Image (cartoon, grey):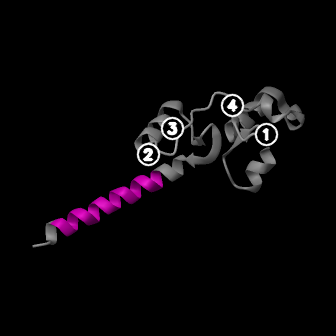
């Protein structure tokens, strides 16, 4: 699992069962915690012993502001997206910041156009 995170240059990955239901998430934080608690034995441990099981999730129609609030309150960087009980994606804090910046830039352009239009 650490090799997977490293190989794909990602900070976390969801853990799902055979039916694609979310059962947890494993992150760099979980790996670091595992190294501290278990040392080299970590390398032979199953993901289920290290993953975070209680995971906040969002739905397709949730607002970006609500997702940002979840990220902030839970002190996490990733929120799985669930639809009809199944994992369909993962939103990172970077995704949220990018969307908010795009919205802010759009508002600035719109306001400038409004102000300069006779």
Give the labeled residue for mark 3.
Answer: 71
Disc 4 target residue: 52
Instruction: Residue 75: give x, y in percent of width and height.
Output: 54, 34
Residue bearing mark 2: 64
Q: Residue at x 43, y 45 (%)?
A: 64
| Label 4 vs 3, first from the N-terminus | 4
CA distance for labels 4 and 3: 15 Å
Query: Image quarter for residue 115?
Result: bottom left
Q: Residue at x 79, y 28 (%)?
A: 49
Judged by depth in the image, the label closer to the viewer, 1 or 3, is 1
N-term mark: 1 or 2: 1
Nearer the observer: mark 1 or 2; the answer is 1
Residue 76 appears left or right of 67? right
Of the residues under marks 2 and 3, which one precedes in the sequence? 2
Residue closest to the far front: 84
Task: Where is residue 112? Give x, y as percent.
Answer: 21, 66
Counting from the top left corner in percent of width and height, residue 52 is at 68, 31
Span of residues in magenta? 97-114
- The residue depicted at 40 percent of the width and 56 percent of the height is 101
> Mark 1 and mark 3: span between their CA atoms?
27 Å
- Name the residue located 27 percent from the left edge and 61 percent from the top edge: 108
Q: What's the magenta bit mostly, secondary-structure-wise?
A: helix
Q: Which residue is mark 1?
A: 18
Please state the horizontal and vertical placement of residue 11, each as a whole percent of the image. 66, 47
Q: Are marks 4 and 2 in contact (CB under 8 Å)?
A: no
1 or 3: tag closer to the N-terminus: 1
Q: Is residue 16 above or below residue 114?
A: above
């Amino acid at each position: 699992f650490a090799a997977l995170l490293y190989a794909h240059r990602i900070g976390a990955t969801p853990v799902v069962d055979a039916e694609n239901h979310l059962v947890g998430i494993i992150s760099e934080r979980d790996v670091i915690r595992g190294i501290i608690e278990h040392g080299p034995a970590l390398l032979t441990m199953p993901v289920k012993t290290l993953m975070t099981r209680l995971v906040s999730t969002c739905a397709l129609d949730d607002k970006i502001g609500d997702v940002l609030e979840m990220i902030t309150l839970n002190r996490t960087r990733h929120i799985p997206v669930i639809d009809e009980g199944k994992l369909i994606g993962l939103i990172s804090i970077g995704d949220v910041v990018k969307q908010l910046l795009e919205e802010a830039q759009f508002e600035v352009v719109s306001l400038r156009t409004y102000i300069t239009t006779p």
